[in-house]
Amino acid sequence: MWAKLMNIVLGIWLMAAPSVLEYGPAASDNGHIVGPIIVTFSTIALWESTYIVQKWNYPFALWLLLSPWVLGYEVATASMSDMAVGMMVLVLSSRKTGMKNRYGGGWSSLWEKNPKHMEDQRDNESEAERREGF
């Protein structure tokens, strides 16, 4: 979870850095566009059932690594900041996180006779019936 929180902080930094470090217009616009996207995907990925969304930060991290040359940044600090953030987002988004619980089962569970995620529910119901004396 800490990696996702760090990505949120890095996305907020991308939005604040143009004012703090006085970037040019290209770097400012880039930070104001990419920053909220990274914050959004990292926030969605905080929940266990949507952890895979953290991988959606990959293209934006790669863009941050390339954008100083593609957009022709005028300020060296903007290039260094965006490239450092891009590298950190790429590494932090690659961090493996597993699921502790099973959720749903996806579309394939609609066609299965006894989907695995329903086994726990059936076990809980039968245990409750035994306790109540049914």
Image (cartoon, rainbow, N blue to C red):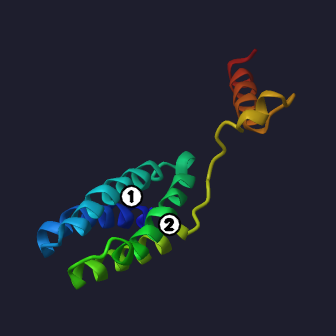
Which residue occupies the foreground of this view, 31 or 110? Answer: 31
What residue is at 52 percent from the left and 56 percent from the top? Answer: 56
For residue 61, the mark is none
Check the image and name the residue furthest to the right. 113
Residue 35 found in image quarter: bottom left
| Residue 131 in the image: above or below residue 38 | above
Cα separation between marks 1 and 2 = 10 Å
Residue 15: image x %, image y %?
Answer: 23, 61
Dot 2 amino acid type: Ser
Q: Is residue 66 left or right of residue 29?
A: right
Q: Quadrant of the C terminus?
A: top right
What residue is at 38 percent from the left and 73 percent from the top? Answer: 70
Instruction: Specify few, some or many for label 2: CA neighbours under 10 Å numbering under 14, 14-19, or 20 or more.
Output: many
Q: Which residue is mark 2?
A: 93
Dot 2 falls on a residue whose secondary structure is: helix
Q: Which residue is mark 1?
A: 38
Residue 129 found in image quarter: top right
Residue 10: image x %, image y %?
Answer: 32, 67
| Residue 88 in the image: above or below residue 96 | below
Residue 52: image x %, image y %?
Answer: 57, 54
Dot 1 amino acid type: Ile
What residue is at 67 percent from the left and 36 percent from the top? Answer: 104
Dot 1 falls on a residue whose secondary structure is: helix
What residue is at 77 percent from the left and 28 percent from the top? Answer: 110
> Which of pointers 1 and 2 lies earlier in the amino acid sequence?
1
Say which of marks 1 and 2 sits in front.
1
| Residue 45 in the image: above or below residue 61 | above
Residue 62: image x %, image y %?
Answer: 47, 70
Q: Is residue 24 left or right of residue 36?
A: left
**Mark 1 and mark 2 residues within 8 Å of each other at the beta carbon:** no
Tag count in the figure? 2
